Image: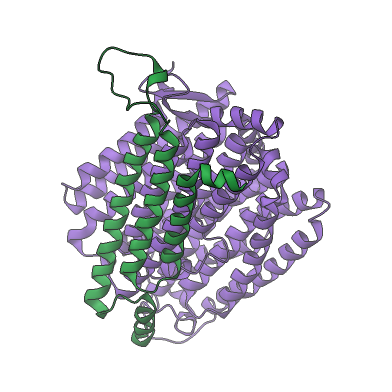
Chain colours: A purple, B green
Amino acid sequence: MDLICNFPCISIVMCILGGIVSSALKGRAAKYLNAVILLAATIMSASVFGYTIMTGESFTYVMGRFPAPWGNELRAGVLEGGMALFFCVIMTLSLFGGQEKLHTEIEPQKLNLYYILCDLLLSSLLSLVYTNDLFTAYVFVEINTISACGLIMISQTGRTIEAATRYMIMSLLGSGMLLLGICMLYDMTGHLLMENIHQTLRASVTAGKFHVPLMITIGMLCVGIAIKSALFPFHTWLPDAYGYSTVSSAAILSSLVSKGYIFLLIKLIYRVIGFDVIYASRVTDILFVFGVAGMIIGSLSAIKENDIFRMIAFSSVAQIGYIYMGFGLGTQAAMVASVFHILSHAVTKALLFLSAAGLADASDGSRRFLDLTGSGYRNRIAGIAFAAGALSMVGIPLFSGFISKLLFAEASVRNSGKMLPAMIALAISTILNAIYFMKTVIRIYTPVKTDQGTILLKKHKLFAASMACFIALNIFLGLCSDWIVDLIETGLEMFV
Amino acid sequence: MGENLFANYGEVVAMLLFGIGFANLLLQKNLIKKIIGLNVMDSAIYLFLALKGYIIGRIDPIIIDGDLNAERYINPVPSGLVLTGIVVSVSVTALMLSLTIRLYQRYHTVDLDEISILLRKEGK
């Protein structure tokens, strides 16, 4: 076994250990440790990614050398490696981008606690990506929830504590359903490893057994994860949680936490239950309906919003709707589009949150649209970054958002039954996106006479560098989309 | 259908409890009652799992007289899962309770709707 095959396990354990060690460190030391861990995890994920591309096949890492039906396993293919690399990069950029702001937002003696949560969050995300065992997935889903809750309420105002409470309640409902679904799968098959469950389920489906329990289980798993990843009607906690937490937290939460759960759902669909079984069960139709509803209602709520952070948060609801609509279309092409949209949305949303914080800084910390007028001139980097993010969200060519919309449109053409609703929803949602994002861009570039000083590039090098990286990554996704779509397709084929 | 319900009465109870816990966690306004609902829901799942591991007529999986025949013992995996699950639910409960304490110290109520109204009055 090559050295690289150990990397998934090492990166997860390293993150957990980093979290434990950080609890004994001072804020500054914890920050450096976190940076080292992020860098190491990025390098490891990159090498796993490169290794799987080179060998052209996935590998399984057996934990503790217990053989297959009993032991615990990690598994890495092209999609897992790529996702892990992507999560690490986004997390690094979000933390660096929001770092200066972070020092003003939380008390200095609590800084190390923030980095503990970041380390734990990264470990749980990596585990959700790599794990091959359903119960391990459940445990790390809970760790993810707990650390996300901590990230929301790290700046202790009444708003954030209430938002964290609401987030926990919805999340716990979701994980309860997820756990029950996993237990029922275990009951039906007697296995916890994904491949074994898949084989046993396949045998019982062909024998015509367990039809009703399987339908209920699929429903439980899908709804559980849909609640956790804030699919419309379960999105009520989201605007508060993203809108009032610290900037780095908002960027990380919106671009990574919900994506981790969605990636788990993709694994459940492909590797546990089977794509054709899920599709035949018609649960995907329900996901499609709620996805489409989320796309439109999320955007409508965003238009009504008067607070820039809450507007971006509501836009997340719409984008999650896009991803679930892709699941609902039930074709391979739509799945590829959904996975691409996970990447595209993560890059863009983190950029938007961070740049919105920059704009608010240039307007005496106010987040109301009226006060933000002309802030694009006062903080030029944030203005450019916000404009780039907004263009990507609306779907202007050159940016990643355009490619994901194009892929969704292509996928919906191939599905004769759902073509019309999907196309109409895409069109309406794009127009609504354009309304609220362009309105904001026009407002921040409306010249206004004020005595507020400008924020200079020199003083915020880290912020500027992270913004530049985000924009570059966004354009990279937009320009090299063929290569990335090919990789996603290979990765999805490796799942089976 | 009817005889299945009677034969698997344990699972039926577990599902009923799950429903009760779920509804409480979702619908109660009082945070403490919500947390109780959470615990009922989790316990129901553990009851379900424990029932799945138990096989009538077999003994607990501790080897005493060197008998390695797996047919003698119950399935130990669900018990392990229940233990792991209990740890998870304890930590989640602790977190929820600490959030409740924070909210109570600030707003002197454990009613989530009242807290929302108070927050809106604060206007932040």
Residue nearest the viewer, comparing B79 with A272: B79
Picture quarter with the C terminus of chain A: top right
Q: Position of residue A413 (x, y in %)?
A: 81, 52
Q: Position of residue A349 (x, y in %)?
A: 51, 59
- Up-down: is A138 above or below A52? below
- Whether residue A66 is visible to the viewer of this picture, yes or no, is no
A450 relative to A99, above or below: below
- Please tell me whether residue A176 is drawn above or below residue A356 in the rendered image: above
Q: Residue at 44%, 40% (x, y): give it.
A: A137
On the image, which quarter does residue A387 sit in?
Answer: bottom right
In this rendering, the count of numbered labels is 0
Q: Is residue A259 above or below residue B117?
A: above
**Residue A58 point in image, percent of width and height:** 55, 25
Quadrant where the N terminus of chain A sits is top left
Residue A264 visible here: yes
What residue sits 40% from the left and 63% below the top?
A: A169
A24 vs A454, left or right, is left
Residue that lies at the very extreme toward the right in this rendered image: A416
Q: Quadrant of residue A439?
A: bottom right
Pick the front one: A243 or A456: A243
> Relative to A33, is A142 on the left or the right?
right
Question: Residue B122 location, x and y as percent?
Answer: 33, 85
- Image quarter of residue B92: bottom left
